[in-house]
Image (cartoon, helix red, strand yellow):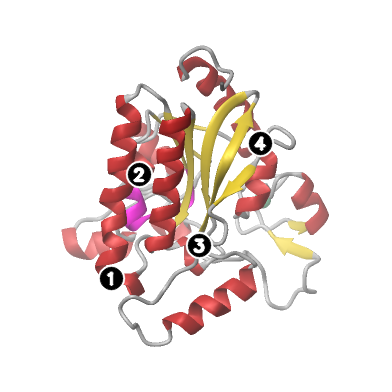
């Protein structure tokens, strides 16, 4: 696959001339897909397996044992610490349009009986960018996992650090990784799941340092975009550059897991890696 064939970053894979909310054209195989079929198939194109974006709450619903998810820090919202022009208004708009308070949800859950804390990023909110709320919620989730002897699962989908919070966004990279290091010292597992797209400061921090790094098929994983890399290095990029498959071939990703298989895979990995007994006291 050439670099120009890669799926582009966009919050919704929709054509504007189609009836709202009914049909979606698959960007990979051009099939016209009814929303209900897509939803029943976990937002994966039935003919070709293209993985569309998935909301954070839908992901949790797909992964958690029924009734086991308890959301944490749901009400945390961003301030505008740098006084960045129009940032507060933009946050308000994003909250209204996405129904989310920021670009990650966190909580306790069980997956096939295994206790874990999960953080699921949501690309619909500010392109999944990481500001201080995203970093703080993920850090608190990791710290809770350490205190309660749970595994950590982070599902990433991000355009990188949120520029409107400047250095406060960048410091979340170190903060989340510091919490993961303390979690690792207690021999508890951390499984990272990269989804389309995982880029920038998220790739360069917690997303790629799992004990096991998983990725969804054909998702984009990178730091800078391919055009920037090409212009900086003055080299042609190899075929499939920055896809999950390329990253697996080069050792960054341990396994590529289709969405329908993720729950089973996470359950097995947690059962294997969590210290016994698995029941929380
Ligand atoms: Zn398709």
Real-space CA distance between mark 2 and mark 1, rounded to the nearest whole angstrom: 19 Å
Question: Mark 2 highlights which residue?
Answer: 206
Please name whichever residue, 46 or 279, is drawn nearer the observer in this view of the structure: 279
Q: Residues within 10 Å of mark 1 (few under 14, many from 20)?
A: some
Q: Residues within 10 Å of mark 3 (few under 14, many from 20)?
A: few
SS for callout 2 = helix
Question: Mark 1 highlights which residue?
Answer: 166
Residue that extends furthest to the front in the rendered view of this protein: 281
- Depth check, mark 4 against mark 3: the one in front is 3
Q: Looking at mark 2, is its residue's CB closer than 8 Å to ligand 1? A: no
- Depth check, mark 3 against mark 2: the one in front is 3
Query: Which quadrant is the C terminus positioned in?
Result: top right
Q: Residues within 10 Å of mark 4 (few under 14, many from 20)?
A: many
Dot 4 or dot 1, earlier in sequence:
4
> Mark 3–mark 2 contact, CB under 8 Å?
no
* Rendered location of residue 119, percent (x, y): 51, 46
Q: Please determine whether, in this image, residue 99 is positioned above or below residue 146.
A: below
């Amino acid at each position: 696959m050439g670099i120009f064939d890669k799926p582009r970053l966009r919050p919704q894979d929709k054509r504007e001339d189609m009836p709202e909310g009914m049909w979606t054209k698959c960007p990979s195989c051009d099939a016209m897909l009814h929303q209900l079929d897509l939803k029943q198939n976990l937002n994966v194109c039935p003919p070709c397996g293209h993985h569309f974006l998935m909301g954070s709450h839908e992901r949790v619903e797909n992964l958690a044992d029924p009734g086991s998810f308890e959301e944490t820090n749901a009400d945390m919202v961003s301030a505008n610490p740098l006084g960045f022009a129009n940032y507060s208004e933009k946050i308000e708009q994003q909250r209204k349009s996405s129904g989310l308070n920021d670009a990650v949800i966190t909580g306790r859950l069980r997956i096939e009986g295994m206790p874990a804390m999960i953080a699921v990023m949501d690309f619909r909110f500010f392109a999944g960018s990481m500001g201080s709320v995203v970093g703080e919620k993920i850090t608190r989730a990791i710290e809770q996992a350490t205190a309660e002897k749970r595994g950590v699962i982070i599902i990433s989908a991000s355009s990188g650090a949120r520029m409107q919070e400047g250095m406060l966004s960048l410091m979340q990279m170190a903060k989340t990784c510091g919490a993961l290091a303390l979690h690792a010292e207690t021999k508890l597992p951390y499984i990272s799941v990269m989804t389309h797209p995982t880029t920038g400061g998220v790739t360069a921090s917690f997303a790629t340092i799992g004990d096991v790094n998983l990725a969804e098929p054909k998702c984009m994983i990178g730091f800078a975009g391919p055009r920037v890399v090409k212009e900086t290095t003055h080299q042609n990029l190899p075929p499939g550059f920055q896809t999950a498959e390329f990253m697996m071939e080069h050792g960054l990703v341990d396994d590529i897991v289709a969405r329908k298989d993720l729950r089973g895979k996470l359950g097995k990995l947690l059962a294997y890696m969590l210290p016994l007994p698995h029941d929380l006291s």
